[in-house]
Image (cartoon, helix red, strand yellow):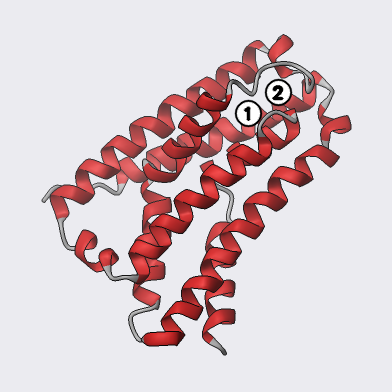
Amino acid sequence: MPPLLRGLSLGLSLIVAIGPQNAFVLRQGLTRRFALLAALACALCDTLLITLGVLGVGGLLAGRAALVLAGTGLGAAFLLWYGLRALRGAWVGGAALHVSGVGAGTPGAVVGTALGFSLLNPHALLDTVVLIGGASAGLDGGARLAFLAGTVLASWAWFFTLALAGRTLAPVMARPGAWRVLDAVIGVTLLGTAAGLLLGLRLP
């Protein structure tokens, strides 16, 4: 398989799985508030991390147990906080659940949350820096650049697809009950991710 297609398929296989970034971008798309900004921020972060991984940083980070421990703990705390907030939204409901409301936040809040889900999420770091970086270890020159382009393309295509698809789902999600279900799914996903990270911690 050509390096470009190999990178594209690997990138899609890793990013399509349900996770904090995907849930966040989809919800912004559903609110029709700063969805493209959320997709752009997540895609840019992934581009940075994937580039670092392909350039060989993944192996260096994976070999530093104390750094991995600190990053995992910080990321789990971030996911726990956001997951609890989503569950609270599912339980309370209210005006913030309306598609036309202002629950999506300000541009600064959207970018900050996207950065948190991208840079404080150890699973995202593992996928982009370590796994993709390791997969590119046997390539060099033009092949490595083509592989990098393929994985970056997968990230950009997926995030912007989520952001735009959310707009088509807006009529369905105009019902408060649908928003509650979505927030509940997001909250459980985030708490499960945080729990998995904490249970998998290994002291150096």
Residue denoted by label 1:
184
Q: CA distance from mark 2 to mark 1?
A: 6 Å
Residue 98 picture location, percent across and down = 77, 18
Which disc is residue 60 wearing? none
Q: Quadrant of residue 120?
A: top left
Tell me if mark 2 has few (under 14), some (14-19) or many (20+) residues whose alpha carbon lies within 10 angstroms of its own.
many
Q: Position of residue 36 (x, y in %)?
A: 66, 41
Which residue occupies the foreground of this view, 115 or 59? Answer: 115
**For the view shown, which residue lies furthest in the bottom direction?**
1
Q: Secondary structure at mark 2?
A: helix
User: Which residue corresponds to the image point at 60% horizontal and 64% vertical from the top-left?
Assistant: 154
**What kind of element bears circle 1?**
helix
Decide: few, some or many residues near mark 1? Use Cα within 10 Å; few <14, some 14-19, many ≥20.
many
Which amino acid lies under the numbered mark 1 shown in the image of this protein?
A: Ala
Q: Which residue is mark 2?
A: 180
Where is residue 1? Give x, y as percent: 57, 90
Which amino acid type is shown beneath numbered disc 2? Answer: Arg
The residue lying at 34 percent from left, 73 percent from top is 134
- Asked whether disc 2 touches disc 1, contact meaning CB atoms under 8 Å apart, the reply is yes
Residue 24 occupies which quadrant of the picture? top right
Residue 56 pos. (x, y %): 28, 70
Tell me if residue 23 can be seen. Answer: no
